[in-house]
Amino acid sequence: MQGFERFSGESVRQCGLTHAQFDIVATLGNTAGMTYKQLGERTLITKGTLTGVIERLEQKGLVARQRSGDDKRSFCVSLTDAGVALFDEVFPAVVGHGKQLFASCSDADFDAIEHALGKLKQLITDAGAPPSPPPTKEIH
């Protein structure tokens, strides 16, 4: 992940954003907005860091926060017009830059990567799950 961030960092920095800020803008792009919880689930940004990142994006005029109608303790975060314009300009450039990295990969390579990442995700999920109770022996 760090290697990919170094590779993609130049195009992200050129738009005046950190990786975390770009992650939020990219995640909010083409959506009506998300709660902090949804953003935390869809990005690699920890809950403790998320608030500061969103506050800095709000100071830049790229996102707006509104209280959620369902839960007054929750905020919905969405891109402003300036945020949408930045997303529309920068996201295709960053994706295009990323495509250069994977240009030599075949469909079979992508299938193998997807399979390996799925297996890794399952291993991590299983490691965080509570242990299963031992099987019980049926008495007939």
Image (spheres, rainbow, N blue to C red):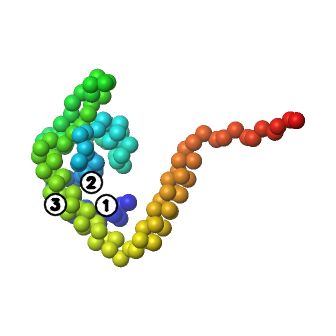
- Going by the image, does 29 lie left or right of 40? left
In percent of width and height, residue 130 lies at: 60, 39
Where is the C terminus found, in terms of image quarters? Answer: top right
x 24%, y 67%: residue: 97
**Could you say which disc has been placed on residue 5 in the image?**
1
Q: CA distance from mark 3 to mark 1?
A: 14 Å
Residue named by callout 2: 19
Compared to residue 30, the image places residue 139 above or below, namely above
Can residue 60 be seen at all in this image of the molecule?
Answer: no
In percent of width and height, residue 59 lies at: 14, 40
Q: CA distance from mark 2 to mark 1?
A: 7 Å
- Going by the image, does 96 lie left or right of 109? left
Mark positioned earlier in the residue sequence (2 or 1): 1
Compared to residue 20, the image places residue 36 above or below, namely above
Who is closer to the viewer here, 82 or 108?
A: 108
Residue named by callout 3: 14
Who is closer to the viewer here, 108 or 57?
A: 108
Task: Check contact, mark 2 vs mark 1: CB within 8 A.
Answer: yes
Compared to residue 77, the image places residue 70 above or below, namely above
> What secondary structure is found at the residue carrying circle 1?
helix
In percent of width and height, residue 14 lies at: 16, 60
Q: Residue furthest bottom?
A: 104
Query: What is the three-letter code of the residue carrying label 3?
Result: Gln
Query: What is the three-letter code of the residue carrying label 2?
Result: His
